[in-house]
């Protein structure tokens, strides 16, 4: 993370930090939503699918945020999130 | 870097600059995540955690804030035979007595809601009644044995802390819950990152280096975090799950599920919104209760009736809603039956929920801890307290760590200054406001209009006042003043209670009033704890060795630059 500071002493986040934050918020929530929806494709009743999907989505969201901040290269983090979203999105589109 | 910043922070040494060029290790990367995810909403998290922790004694707090309602004698449960007898007259059942009382006093109400009081502050005969007629709502307790109605003072009660825990205040409930959800997710991430950061997680728990400044704060942070770690993970995760329907509604939308219908299948709540009502007599309720309970007990012998709600009593649209639950059941959903109030026919009844719904409600139950007996609730309370300690030490550690890098401790940079002031206003100001609310409960005139609202407004005025005080005083003085105020107010709460009620410590001991004795002892213990914190944080001076070390470091940094 950037160590540059403003004249008031606040850390100035650089582009990569902002980009990671955006990815962590949007990407993790997006993948969590797709995971939630994916459960509707399972051969279980809709009510169970909704509840299991919601519970799993919290775990997935937390893991995705950790993953976004764990990957050293920013482009790799974007690539992983984009790939996962595409795969999950395609499965959801094809099955629901 | 501007000139002003140069004078406020120590410039990097050559060694530090060299280190910066190295690629950060994974643990160091996670350390940043842990720090910033913990700090950015740390003050809100501390508020949520503290409010949640005291909410484990929500009913007891409410009972303490309504001292005019006499203590209950326990246990005085009806013998099972009398509860199960189908021929028993309506008036022999506590619920039946309450309904007879409501027929006599509020026959034209829109809704009657009668529920058993919590076992910790009530007994089988003491029922809680809420009636609503048009826009008016009346709440009171009713002793079915002595036929006495207890009208308590208008108070926010312990429920204020409970609602504040996830609904905050002075803002839209939906937005508050979204903010609380974001804070909870940040907490979950900070906990996971904290585990990854720890090289020696087990050893760290048994390590405490006293009087070593930053090292001591880190050890305290570890102690509050490591042993209760399963609790911290559970409470944060289940906290998000309790409000998950708000954060993740997409499954229901895509599957085109009628959520109202879904919730009506799980929960018994039905709004009393019928119009064009005609007067009509109501069926005798006792046989219905007896049948419902005995049939539920065939499935689970611990099932008992917990509440009875009657929509539009004494009309042709009357509905009797009976709820039952097993004692110490973790899941928050029980069984229910809805009867036609005129004929006594069953209109609807609960079905066993799907496993996913049960899992969801078990998680909510684990979070709320309502199933827990006294001992387990104390455990919840202490672990919640450890969570508050973890967040508080983490927030203080952030400033302690960075204070060492300041050139001039009296003129810190704005970010440091803001964090330190927010720390003081939250970690010391919030407890002061909480005790202040208890004082307002005793000091505001009983006949005051909107008394409960003024208790809450007073809470926020005290909290805002402590923030202003923090801004006006130096940090060291602000810590000292606010923590001393918390200590003194806690210490004098039992005295205030004895002066303003008839349930002071001596009277409580003589009458065996366990609730009020426990509160007085708890206030005293908390006062001792805050007295120690006041001493440790504000009166204990930095050792001469530490001071010299700090001065030498600063001098050497200036020479190098």
Image (cartoon, coloured by chain):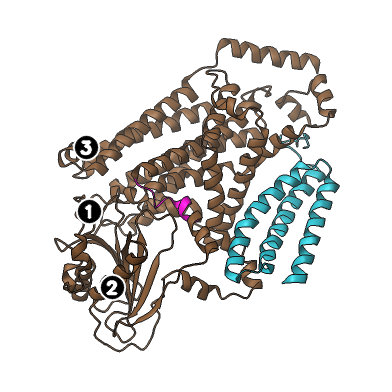
Chain colours: A cyan, B brown
Instruction: Name the residue carrying label 2.
Output: B291
Secondary-structure class at tag 3: helix
In space, the residues marked 2 and 3 are separated at their CA atoms by: 45 Å
C-beta proximity under 8 Å, tags 1 and 3: no
Q: Residue furthest front?
A: B298
Number of the front mark, 1 or 2: 2
Is residue B458 shown above or below B103? above
Is residue A69 shown above or below B410? below
Question: Which of marks 2 and 1 precedes in the sequence?
Answer: 1
Let me know if residue B370 is in the magenta part.
yes
**Which chain does tag 1 point to?**
B
Q: Quadrant of the N terminus of chain B?
A: top right
Query: Is residue A66 left or right of B115 when viewed as pictured?
Result: right
Is residue B391 shown above or below B346? above
Instruction: Name the residue carrying label 1.
Output: B69
**Residue drawn at (31%, 87%) of the image:** B316
**Residue drawn at (68%, 58%) of the image:** A32
C-beta proximity under 8 Å, tags 1 and 2: no
Q: Quadrant of the C terminus of chain B?
A: top right
Q: Position of residue A40 (x, y in %)?
A: 66, 68
Q: Position of residue B408 (x, y in %)?
A: 66, 22
Secondary-structure class at tag 1: loop
Q: Position of residue B480 (x, y in %)?
A: 46, 27
Query: Is residue B40 left or right of B159 when viewed as pictured?
Result: right
> Which mark, by number, is residue B505?
3
Q: Are marks 1 and 3 on the same chain?
A: yes
In space, the residues marked 1 and 2 are separated at their CA atoms by: 33 Å
> Which mark, by number, is residue B31?
none
Residue B411 seen in this snapshot: no
**Which chain does tag 2 point to?**
B
**Residue drawn at (49%, 27%) of the image:** B477
| Residue range corresponding to the magenta coloring | B364-373
């Amino acid at each position: 993370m950037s160590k540059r500071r403003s004249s008031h002493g606040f850390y100035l986040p650089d582009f990569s930090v902002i980009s990671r934050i955006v990815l962590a918020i949007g990407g993790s929530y997006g993948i969590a939503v797709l995971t939630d929806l994916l459960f509707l494709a399972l051969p279980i009743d809709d009510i169970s699918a909704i509840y299991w999907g919601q519970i799993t989505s919290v775990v997935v969201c937390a893991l995705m945020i950790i993953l976004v901040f764990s990957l050293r290269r920013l482009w790799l983090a974007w690539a992983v999130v984009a790939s996962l979203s595409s795969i999950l999105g395609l499965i959801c589109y094809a099955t629901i | 870097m501007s000139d002003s910043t140069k004078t406020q922070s120590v410039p990097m040494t050559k060694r530090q600059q060299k280190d910066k060029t190295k690629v950060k290790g994974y643990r160091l990367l996670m350390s940043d995540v842990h720090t910033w995810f913990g700090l950015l909403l740390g003050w809100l998290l501390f508020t949520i955690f503290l409010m949640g922790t005291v909410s484990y004694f929500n009913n007891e707090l409410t009972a303490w804030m309504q001292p005019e309602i006499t203590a209950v004698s326990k246990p005085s449960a009806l013998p099972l035979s009398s509860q199960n007898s189908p021929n028993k007259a309506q008036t022999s059942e506590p619920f039946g007595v309450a309904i007879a009382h409501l027929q006599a006093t509020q026959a034209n109400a829109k809704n009657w809601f009668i529920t058993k009081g919590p076992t910790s502050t009530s007994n089988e005969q003491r029922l809680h009644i809420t009636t609503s007629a048009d826009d008016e709502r009346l709440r009171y307790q009713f002793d079915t044995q002595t036929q006495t109605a207890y009208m308590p003072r208008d108070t926010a009660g312990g429920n204020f802390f409970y609602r504040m825990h996830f609904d905050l205040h002075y803002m839209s409930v939906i937005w508050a819950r979204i903010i609380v959800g974001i804070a909870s997710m940040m907490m979950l991430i900070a906990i996971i990152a904290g585990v990854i950061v720890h090289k020696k997680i087990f050893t760290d728990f048994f390590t405490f280096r006293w009087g070593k400044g930053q090292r001591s704060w880190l050890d305290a942070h570890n102690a509050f975090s490591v042993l209760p770690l399963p609790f911290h993970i559970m409470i944060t995760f289940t906290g998000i799950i309790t409000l998950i329907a708000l954060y993740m509604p997409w499954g229901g939308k895509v599957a085109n599920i009628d959520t109202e219908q879904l919730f009506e299948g799980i929960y018994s709540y039905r709004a009393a919104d019928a119009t064009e009502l005609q007067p009509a007599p109501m069926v005798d309720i006792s046989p219905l209760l007896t049948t419902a309970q005995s049939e539920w007990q065939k499935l689970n012998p611990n099932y008992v009736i917990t509440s009875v709600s009657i929509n539009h009593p004494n009309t042709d649209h009357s509905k009797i809603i009976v709820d039952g639950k097993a004692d110490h059941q973790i899941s928050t959903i029980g069984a229910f039956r809805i009867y036609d109030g005129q004929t006594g026919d069953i209109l609807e009844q609960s079905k066993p929920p799907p496993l996913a719904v049960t899992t969801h409600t078990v998680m909510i139950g684990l979070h709320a801890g309502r199933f827990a007996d006294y001992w387990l609730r104390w455990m919840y309370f202490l672990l919640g307290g450890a969570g508050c300690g973890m967040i508080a030490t983490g927030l203080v550690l952030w400033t302690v760590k960075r204070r060492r890098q300041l050139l001039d401790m009296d003129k810190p940079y704005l970010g440091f200054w803001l964090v330190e002031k927010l720390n003081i206003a939250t970690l010391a100001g919030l407890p002061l406001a909480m005790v202040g609310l208890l004082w307002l409960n005793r000091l505001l005139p009983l006949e005051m209009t909107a008394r409960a609202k003024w208790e809450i407004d007073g809470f926020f005025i005290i909290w805002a006042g402590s923030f202003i005080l923090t801004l006006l005083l130096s940090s060291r003085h602000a810590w000292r003043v606010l923590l001393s105020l918390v200590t003194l107010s806690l210490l004098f709460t039992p005295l205030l209670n004895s002066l303003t009620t008839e349930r002071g410590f001596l009277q409580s001991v003589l009458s065996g009033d366990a609730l009020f004795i426990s509160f007085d002892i708890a206030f005293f213990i908390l006062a001792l704890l805050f007295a120690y914190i006041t001493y440790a944080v504000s009166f204990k001076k930095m050792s001469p060795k530490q001071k010299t070390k700090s001065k030498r470091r600063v001098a050497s940094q200036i020479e190098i630059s």
